[in-house]
Each structure stands twice: as C-alpha cells, then as structure tokens.
Amino acid sequence: MRTLARIWMRLRNFATGRRNDERLREEIEQHLAMLTEENIRAGMPPGEARRQARLKFGPVEPIRDDYHAEEGLPIGETLLQDVRFGFRQLRKARGFATVAVLTLALGIGVNTALFSIVDAVLLHPLPVANPDELVTVDAGKPNFPDGSVSYPNFRDWKRANRSFAAFAIFRHIGFTLTGSGASARLHGDYISSDFFPLLGVKPVLGRLFAPGEDEIGRGPVALISAGLWARMFGARPDVIGRSITLDGKSFVIVGVISSDFDLSFRSFRVGDVYLPIGQWSTGALKDRSAGLGIHGIARLRPGVSLPRAQADMDGLSAQLAAQYPQEDGDVRATMRPLRAAIVGGVRPVLLVLLGAVSFVLLIACLNVANLLLVRSGARAQEFGIRLALGAGRRRIIRQVLTESTILAVAGGTLGLVLAGLGTTAMVHLMPTGLPRIKEIHLDFVVLIFALITSVAVGLCFGLFPALRIVSQAPQGIIKQGDRRISGGRYRAQDWLIVFEMASALVLLAGAGLMTRSLMALSHIHPGFEPHGILTFSLAIPYSPQNSTPEGMRAYLRAVDQKILSVPGVRAVSLTWAAVPLTGDDDEEYFWLPGEVKPTELMDMHWALRYIVEPGYLNAMGIPLRRGRFLTDGDRAGAPPVVVIDEDLARRYFGDANPIGRQVNLNSSNATATIVGVVGHVMQWELDNDTQFSLHSELYVPFSQISKDSLIDSSGFVSDLVVRADNPAIVFPAIQQALRTMNAEQVPYLPKTMDEFIDESLAARRFSMVLLGGFAALALLLAGIGLYGVISYLVSQRRQEMAIRMALGAGRGDVLAWVMIRGARLAFLGAGVGLIAALAVTRLVARTTLMNTSMFYGVSAYDPMTISGVTIALLLVALIASWVPAQQAASVDPMQTLRSE
C-alpha cells in the first residue's frame, strides 16, 4: 500500500507541475479504469464504483490525473497536456491520422491557392498612392458607355470641374526606335503632365513632365522606363539630357520611371517610353469629335464623393453639349472607381470559383468528421471510463477538439505546400488579360488565411463528434460498448455522406454546364475561316520615298508583293481596324440618300469601318453574298465604293438588293456606291457579339482613304492579315523579306487568328478547368467518404452478417444488403444535390464572365447535363459501395462467430 501511495504522490506532483512521468500516469490510469469498469458492470452507480475503486487502490486522496484535472493548474499547462496527449493518441492511430491529414491538405490547399488569387486581384490595394480616391473618366456615347475622350473635351473638363484634385489622360501607343542599331518597336504611352503626380509615382532619376509640357507645340521631351534605361543605356546616370529617336523624331530624356510601377487599365499599359500627349502629331488631336482611344483618370478632392463628382461632370457635359451640339450633343462624362475599372469584370467569376472551392473544403471536413465519429466509436469505452472517473465534460470536449485541431494544422501545413504548387498551376492557366496577374503569390496574408482556416476547420469538424461523446451516459457506454449509441452515430454518418454527395453534385453540375458552354462556343462560326491566318503590325518610317500619297500607295503595293513572294503565303492585305476579336475598332458615321443630313454626329447611323485591300476577302476567308469585293480598280480618283455586310444590308435595305445603292460617308464627305455584300464577321466576342449596338460592318478601299491618313511625319503603321500554309512559322521569313526591302521598317506582334480565338475563350476555359478540377476532387472525396462509412458498417456488423449467413442467407443477400445501403445514401444525396444544384446554377447563370453570362448555349437547368452528372455521381457511389460489399459477402460465418 505504501508503494501505491508513493506512486500516487508522484502523480500528484506531476499534476501540480513538479514532475512529468507519462508512463507512471498511464499505469495508474489503466489500473483505476479496470477497477471502475468491474464495479459498474457489477451494477454499482458510477460514483460508488469510482469510490470503491479508489478504496481498493489504497488510502490516498481523491484522484486528479493530468487528463481530467482542471483545478490548481494554469490553463497553459493543461492545454499543453492536451496537446501532448493528442499527439500520443494520433501516433497510435497513424492510418487514421494520415488519411485525415491528406484529406484536409487537399481541401485547405486548393482553398488557399484560390484565395491567393482573390487576395492579389481583389483585396490587395492598388500600387498607387491613396487608390480609393482615384476614378476613371470616360466619354459616354450612345454605342459606347465608356468611350474615349477627345483632347478638347479633356481640356474643358479639367479647367471647369470642381471635384478633381488632379485630372490626367493617357493613350497606349507604339513607337519605332531608330538611331541606335537595329530598329525596334517600343511600347509607349502618351500622357498629360498630371498623370504620374496624380498616381504618386516619382522618378528614380531626373524629373517628371512639368506643367504645360503636355501642350501642343511644346518641346519634345520623354520619360523612359527603368528597363529601357538598363537595356539601352546600361543604367548610366548621365542618361538625363540625352536624346532618343522615336518615329524619326528626337526627344530629350528628362526622367526615368521605376520598374516597380506596374498598372494596367483601359488603354494604359506600362511601357518603355512615355511622351507628352501634345507631342502626338496627328491633326485629329484638336478634333472635338475624335476620341482617338484617349481615356482619363482623376483624383477626387478630399470629402468629394463619386455621386457628387458625377453630378458636377454631368453639369459640365450639358454645357459643352449646348455649346458644341454636333460633337458633344450626346457625350456625357462617366466615372468609375479605379479598382472597379481594373478588376470589375473578373470579380464575379473569382467569387464564384471561391464559392466552388469552399464546397471542396466542406466535403473534406465532412469526411474527417466521419472519420472522427468512427474513431469516437472505437474510443467510446475509454471516454466512458474517464467520465466515470470524474473527468469534466468540458475537458473531454477540449481534448477531442485539440486532437482535431492538431490534424487540421498538420493538414494546413501540408496544404500550404499544395497551395504553392496549385497557385503556380492556376497562374499558368489564367487568361493573359486577367488584371494584376503579376501580383499573385503566397504572402503573409495568405499564410494567415491558411492558419485561420486550419484552426477553424479543426474546431468545426471536431465539435460534433465531441458533443456526441459527452452526451451519453458513461455507465451505458461501459456496459454495452458502443452498441447503444451505434444507431445515432450511423444516422449522423449517413447524413454527413448525404451532404457530401449533394455538395459534389452541385460542383459537378456547374462544371458540366461550363463544359457544355465551351463546347457550344467551339462550334460557333466567327464569320471567317480562322485556320491559316497570321496577323502582325508593320511600322514604316517616314522617308522621301513615301513622302507623297502616290509614293506611299506604291510603297504599300510593294510591301504586298514582297510578302506574297514568301513561300507558303497565299493572300495578304493591309488593314485598319479590320482584325476581329482584338478589341480594336473604327467607326463610320453615315446617312442614306433621301435622308436629311443630321446636324449632330450622334444622330447619324453608325457602322464598324474596315479599311482593307482587295486581298482581304481571301486572306480572311469571308464569304461573298452578293456583287463583288474591292478590286485594284477601286483606287484614288475612281468613284468611291464600299462593301457592306449582310447585317447592314438587312437593317437598312430590308429584302431589297443593296447593290448599286449609295451611302453618304461622313469621314470623307463623299457618296459611295455599294458594290458588294459579304457575310457578317464577329468583331467583338464569339458569345456576345450581337449584344453590342455597334454591329453592322462597312468595308472601305485602302487606296481611297485621304492623303492625311497616309502621310505623317512620324511614319505609317498598319496591321496586316496573311493567309499562309503554316501561319505559325511563316513570320520569320516575312520579317526577313521586309527587312531586305527596308531595314528600318519593323514588323512586330505576330499572332495567328487561332490564338486570338483561344484568348477570347481563355476566361471560360480557365473557369471550366478549375470548376472541373474542383468537381473531380469533390467526387473523389465523396466516394472515399462513402467507402469509409460502408466499410465501417461492415466491420461493426460482421457478427450480425455471420449469423444471417449461418441461418441461411446467401452471399448475394449480404452483398445486396450492403449495396442497397450505399445506394440509398447516394440517391438521397443526389436528390438533395439536385435541388441545391438547380438553385446554384441559376445564380451562376446570372453571373457575368467578362460582361457575358457564364453559361452559353445551355440552360442552367439543362436536362442532359444534370442527368449526366447525376449518373456519374451514382456510378462512383456504387463503385465505392461495391468493395466493402464484396468483403462482407466473403465473410466466413463459422470463423467469425467462433472469434466473436
């Protein structure tokens, strides 16, 4: 007895923090548990059983072991004991812990990966000073709610507004660099003087543009990027004051912009060089009706809200409309927060994907909760004895939650590794136009998200099993093992599986509809034959050879002949705004003979204007419906002609034949004769082209455009379309041929039309791939969960099945019994999932993907898709049930009964 008393005193010393003897504590705990269990089975109440066990153990104080003793110990130490005990328990169940950690790692990993994208794109502040004060300023027009701003309107808005602390404009453009070796094409921007100060950007060297340096006629100055500074000047500090030749004109470098500045919105792109807007040599800069792709950005004054600023600009727009009714009659300044202008189109899509990946995490949690229920059943007697020995229910709950949190944190740690790989994979899948894509990475915010998610997941999926444990009477658990609570636990596990199946079906339905949408889009004919088309741009420097309209036209014909001489090239055409699906456009205002010419520009008819050469029809593969296309005879001095598309013919001429009819063109102030009708080309988007009000198309001969459009002291730039046998590899040969013709002209930006189409579908493909991956992962986890539940059922009821087989039941009966149970859960989950899927897909159908519905050519309730994914879910469920059913059917009844 004295020995036992010394042992107990040593245990008490440990409980008060004086010793740490794990092995001794376990020995005493097992001895007390055995004595208490014997007393309870003999019919003693739990309290009396515990008292008698203590009496048999020896004359010592009431027992308070480190597992359930709470009085007298600091909370930190009891928590540390819970953690140590949890690790020890999980080490004893390595299989359970491994499956749980891997399951949680998958769920937390994909959630963290997608959150890193959401955080970078939607949550991170923009890389400018006080971004919440910044708004974009555009010119709202009948066909373009966010149209470009004319330079005269910008000057008037800037001078008269009362809402902006600063107001600037910008326009992305390309420049040909000469005078420093081989000619090269640089990306650049025309900006006003306030642009960089408005954004809070400071030069790393030199200065920014001074006020007034953006005025027309001021001296030629330039800012260059740090990248160009390093490439061209070796990052030497004496670059300030040196000259750079762009489009044949010399500019003095006054400053260098940091490479950390990276912001893309509207027509602004971070470039190699920045010039004052007044240096743009086009005469249209002074035209109040010419937007020229210019857009604005402003910083609101302190205390000025966006609605107040909009009201102020509405007043200014009305004043200009009254003063210039023809140019500004229907023009209204429109504003949006800069953040919305940058990420507004992708925000709904990312939120839908984040919601979808949350289903994966939910299924992973449900799976682990099921595992914990199974484990709690196996540990039922242990917990019952601890309760009988006096352990508090709160301490039992805390211990179970501690174990589940350990699992979650371990899963979260492994999930971070998977998140890093997943983020890299997602970035590679993303469309190139996704804003802020360079900012996506795993940072401190993402790590905090993963930690919070892990802890929250551990508490959530561990709470339910813990509550079920402590809700049972300890004597019932000890007497009957876990048989008394089996039915309740089975029901809980069944419902968890039902929810898993339902969640998986929701994701499968969304992925199926996105797949059907992409398939429908892939069968849309864009109005031309995209295979075999190469597009690129060509910058031709100004020279005496092309200093006259006749000389430039002759030069351009020589360009065509040089390209046609390249092996494999079958057709070629110079184009202006005639490359579909690129986002570029040009408009023509017109009115029909017999109509009074409208006094205001916006009251005229509008059409997309394609300025092309005779080879354009063959190069693009556009069908000719009536009449003829443009020919070499449609040149300068010949009667003006146009070709229209079938949409314009139907809209303005109905069923009548438009060949020979005339249209009055505002751009050239000429009356042109319609000589042909061609098929309609989808200029904007494959899935949303008809939604654009500017839809009809009109083709004008390149040779009949005005001389002012052909001759410019800065040179000539045009796009070209080429039909070739192998467009992916023909560009180097074309490039070499053009360089032999003129070493200073620069062909650049080659791209096949197939690539343009792929890019137009990239956002949908990205959403489909992610949704499909999430759905496949959810289906796998749901199948594993069902397999686990059925396997546990079979293991717990082996004796019952053996008795049935001993009494005459066949193996087929047992197989059917197990399969029916699995099928019942699957069908119930599919039923719940169908209801949820119909509601969720209807909501997703209303979500826009780059201003169009996420689903195309398929209803949110598409019966083929819904039935297909339901069948797939049921097949996986049957497979998951088949394996444990086979094991149940192979039970040897005599051997099982003998072992029981």
Image (spheres, rainbow, N blue to C red):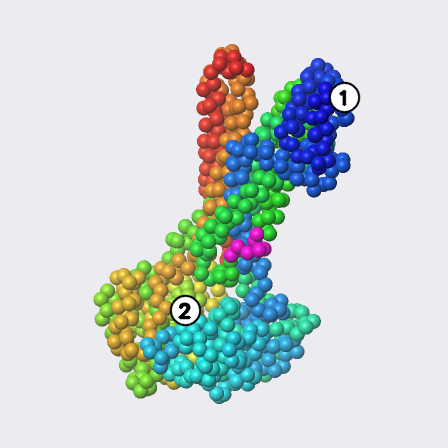
Q: Residue 233 vs residue 16: left or right?
A: left
Q: Is residue 14 visible?
A: yes
Where, by quadrant of the figure, is residue 312 drawn? bottom right
The magenta stretch spans residue 272 = no
Question: Start and end of the magenta stretch?
Answer: 441-447
Is residue 444 located in the magenta-colored stretch of the structure?
yes
Residue 53 appearing in the image: no
Give the residue pinned by disc 2: 697
Image point (45%, 58%), residue name? 431
Around disc 1, counting alpha carbons within 10 Å, would you say few (fewer than 14), some (14 to 19), or many (20 or more)? Answer: few
Residue type (three-letter) at the residue carrying disc 1: Pro
Q: Between 515 and 622, which is closer to the camera in this rendering?
A: 515
Q: Position of residue 472 (x, y in %)?
A: 69, 27
Task: Name the quarter where the N terminus is drawn.
Answer: top right
Q: Amino acid at mark 2?
A: Glu
Q: Position of residue 454 (x, y in %)?
A: 59, 45
In the picture, measured across the screen, residue 249 lies left or right of residue 739, that is right
Residue 174 lies, with reference to residue 695, above or below; the image says: below
